[in-house]
Amino acid sequence: MRWTWLALLPLAAGCDSLRIRDLMDHPTALSREVVELPGERCELGGRDVLVGTDDNRNGVLDDEEVTGSTLVCAIAETQMRVEQQPVPPGERCPGGGWVTRAGYDFNQDGVLDTPEVAREVYSCRDIAEAQLLTRSRAATPSSRACLEPTSLTFVEAGHDEDGDGVLDDDEVRTRLEVCVEVSRLLITRAWEPTCAAGGTRVSAGMDLDTDGVLDDEEVLASNPICEDLNTFDGTFVIRGPVDVAVLKGLSRIRGNLEVRTGNTPVAELRLTALEVVDGTLYVQDNASLTRLELPGLRFIGQGLSVLNNAALETVTVGGATGQSTWVGTHLEVAHNPQLQSLDGLQSVVPRGGVLIEDNARLAHTSQGLGLRAIQTLTGSLRIKDNPALALLPLPNLTSVAQSVLIENNARLTTLEGTRLEHIGKNLEVTNNPALRTLTGLGALHTIGVTLEVRLNAALVDSNGLGSLAQVESIFFSRNDALAWWGNMPRLQGLRGTLSLEAHARLVDVRGMESLRMLSWLSLYNNPSLTTLTGLAGVERLTGLASEQNGALTSLADLKGLRTLESLMLLDNPLLTELGLPAVQQVSRYFSIQRNPQLPTCRVRAFGERVYTGPGNVYLVAGNNDAATCP
């Protein structure tokens, strides 16, 4: 009967009927493993065992043939294995190198099998024999004073990696700052034995004995430039322990290094061999990382960003050799609530700007090291929202080419902690509730554009600016405890505005004896202000405005003032006299209104004597019309 049924089957199926072996040959069951990276499913990573049938009979379990899977997670970092093999010179590594493989030994056979490899990294020896170049240039602006006839000079060195015979800015690997007579400057290069792959020590000094040789006693500064040992091309992202393991043999990354472990349980990360990162070093969004140590790092081509690390307590970059760690652009340390100190960044020297923001436990004391290697910044400095910071952490900073912002640092009582002499644009000190004085800025002589001090509730005076000789405009506003303002004896003129606004306790202005000219003098809503003796030397103003100064009775303290373009005296309830005997001309705008104690007849007599502008902006109203004048 069985044979009868089989005999009839071809007749039912047609000429291309199924053969018997097609019925008897079932697809083979297959399995394969894929690496599961550290993440939500496996904190430390693992492997996913996929199963299914080889429906197309190609001997491989294709994705569409998978019918089930079993996830096996690593349970301890002790299961991790790291293996290295040499790579001969060839297409992958022209100069030879190493391949490092890391993963978890799930079957515990002591061997890292191919399915168990989670990360494979090639580190190649750099065979480009780039020439080491040096250059020197005048330091502008000068970050520190030198005794004549010497001047501050930058000596920079690095490898000519693009081979154009010129040391470009992005090729500079070290910079020396020396006070020398430029004609007697000597630069030498010597073998540096402290570098793992060899290197060169660059020294600079002055040829005091004019023998053409830089003797040991003539050396003023020196730094090593180390050769690269093993190089990784591209951006390297650390997401878990496997990535850390394969990175440990690298000395250079030609790209960015990103430490972004997320929620994986990486608590400590220490890489001693890494020396150069050509791009940006990001340490960002690491929930478990408490300690980061990169002691051998000596150069970062772009920026260094330490951002949003919830558990980070300690970060160390550079310092192993005692030399500076150069950063091509900026340094950012922000949103790290457990970070307590910047001492681990004591060797870091960014060429651009510095941002220190929203680090809840960050503190610094006079015994701390802080960012002590930084002397000049070509960008801006922002220190903001650090509630535990009582002292600024830049003890050797003298010059900032752009702006400085110091804002909302709850424990900051003074501005000590820098040696600032020069700020290229603006200095803004805002909303630091414990700040009582501006001491700490005693060496500051130049602010390129604006000085703005506002909303510092405990600030009692403006002491601390005794050396200030150049600034375009000054704005002080809403500093509730400010009792007196001034004490800038070297300041002779302002091209812009001097504005004192909304100070409930401000009584007098003093210590401005050298001030002769400014554009606008604006006094607004200072209800206790009575005295302006510090402005007695001012001779010329574009505009003078006094509004809502409840205790001011006279402007007689402005006894040197001779010429004005605009005059506005509004809503000063106790103003009884103008007291501007030396004023000879008001040429553009005249508005004296709503000063109920000021005799109208005196105002009109003054206006008739000095005003030469158009009649439609000559405004006199709301003063004391009942008063009589002799």
Image (cartoon, helix red, strand yellow):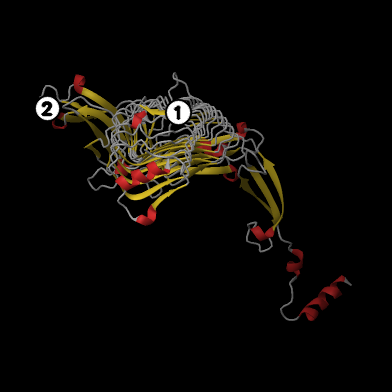
Quarter occupied by residue 542: top left
Q: Nearer the viewer, residue 149 or 313?
A: 149
Near mark 2 (Cα within 10 A), the count class, few <14, some 14-19 or many ≥20, is few
Q: Is residue 314 left or right of residue 16?
A: left
Mark toward the start of the polypeptide (2 vs 1):
2
Total labels: the figure holds 2
- Residue 578: image x %, image y %? 38, 38
Secondary structure, mark 1, is loop
Q: Is residue 596 left or right of residue 155?
A: right
Quarter occupied by residue 30: bottom right
Q: Are marks 2 and 1 in contact (CB under 8 Å)?
A: no
Q: Which residue is mark 1?
A: 507
Q: Nearer the viewer, residue 80 or 551?
A: 551
Q: Is residue 331 visible?
A: yes
Please state, as top left, top right, bottom left or bottom right, where the C terminus lies in the image: top left
Q: Is residue 206 left or right of residue 28?
A: left
Q: Amino acid at mark 1?
A: Val
Secondary structure, mark 2, is loop
Residue farthest toward the left in the current orientation of the protein:
211
Please state, as top left, top right, bottom left or bottom right, where the N terminus lies in the image: bottom right
Q: Is residue 592 above or below residue 503?
A: below
**Which of label 2 and label 1 is nearer to you?**
1
Residue farthest toward the right in the current orientation of the protein:
1
Q: Is residue 317 left or right of residue 21?
A: left
- Residue 48: image x %, image y %? 66, 47
Q: Which residue is mark 2?
A: 212
Q: Amino acid at mark 2?
A: Gly
Quarter occupied by residue 575: top left
Near mark 1 (Cα within 10 A), the count class, few <14, some 14-19 or many ≥20, is many
- Residue 561: image x %, image y %? 30, 37
